[in-house]
Image: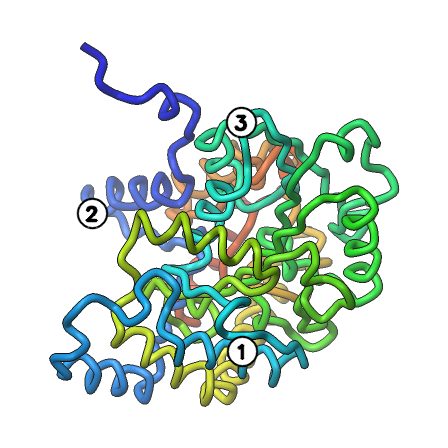
Amino acid sequence: MNILADRLKNIPQYLFMELRDRIKQMEACGTDVISLAVGDPVEPTPAYIIEILRQAALDPSNHQYPTDEQKGMHAFRAAVARWYKRKYGVRLDPETEVLGLGGSKEGIHNLLMAIVNPGEVIMVTDPGYPGYLANIPIVGGEAYRIPLLARNGYLPDLDGMPESVCRKAKVFFFNYPNNPTGACANIDFFTRLVAWAKTHRIFLVHDNPYSEIVLPGGEKLSLLQMPGAKDICVEFNSLSKTYNMTGWRIGMAAGNPDIIQAMSKFKENVTSGIFNAIQLASIKALDDGDDDIDKMIRIYARRRAMALEEIRQWGIDTTVGKGTFYLWLPVPNGMSSIAFTSHLLEKAHVLVTAGSAFGKNGEGFFRMSLTVPDDRLACALERMRRTLNG
């Protein structure tokens, strides 16, 4: 008897769990693998954030169901509103325009479940974060891939989108600073995007967890800054990358109040919310963590410069974006993305992510993360150089 749901057949294994499994297998055989494949900051969460967590965890009142359960405690939502006002000049009503999330990955699923019907078209970028595509078959939607090409600065060509697809599309998922390419959008593009979406009655979902990981030359932006964006947009963000809190699983959705309410309605039936102590510590991060963001950007800039100086000597084009802590680089020697990454893993014991894992337009590229200590990054680059030199 087959007791499994048919929908599981259409859901691929989550890319980064697959990569972790490969590392575990090799390490079990005694191999020292350096992973540059996953964006998981190695630096600890700042101590003052952890101290608030400790104090809150000792308070018995926080051992019960979380305050305001699925919505997130009002104090956390108010901190999100303060953060958006301070960072971007965006005014949010904490009661109706902000929702606490167990990370932005949860938000992707909740939004699709709340607003997409079977057969409706969801636009996603290609290359793009695999989590978008993985959730579409769960809701019975139909994915349409929008190419992101180097010649367009890895921005979608709004004028080139087929009118027949635009008429059918309900939602467009995208993110800038972009994972995997590191490209940053600008105000001009976001302004045109909002106008385009209103013309075609397409709802925009801006997945923005790298909003603060922008090096000099890029712009830190929220789509909600654009006039009229709240009419047709929800933006996700997360404390994971910004405050080195990937394991804490906390983030937020902000924007259109009707969609926030729809997500909340779905969420209240599948979760009991985020541990109060985590929310209270996150308030401290949002209010007082700007200096730590600047510190991490300096660290990533240093590692980026180290990596690019080395990689240039390999004859690889090092024209890369200004956002995220990833490098998006062309595969050398005409190899396929999978062949190149497999070769590095087998010969150099260094794991990077094949560009094709992010979509067909990622073929010919690989993504490399800078979220490892400097000495491990230097060691990985040395191993890569020896391997590429034969």
Q: For the residues carrying marks 2 and 1, which lies nearer the camera in this image?
A: 1
Say which label, 3 or 1, has the lower sequence index. 1
Say which label, 3 or 2, has the lower sequence index. 2
- Name the residue rendered at 66%, 38% in the picture: 170
- Name the residue rendered at 69%, 51% in the picture: 315
Judged left or right of residue 341, residue 316 is: right
Q: Position of residue 378 (x, y in %)?
A: 46, 66
Q: Which numbered marker is on residue 118?
A: 3
Front-most of residues 171 and 219: 171
Q: Which numbered marker is on residue 30?
A: 2
Give the answer, above or below, for where 162 lies relative to 277: above
SS label for mark 3: loop
- Name the residue rendered at 40%, 48% in the picture: 266
Q: Which numbered marker is on residue 81?
A: 1
In the rendered image, the residue lying farthest to the top is: 1
> On the image, which quarter does residue 379 sit in?
bottom left
Cα–Cα gap, marks 3 and 2: 47 Å
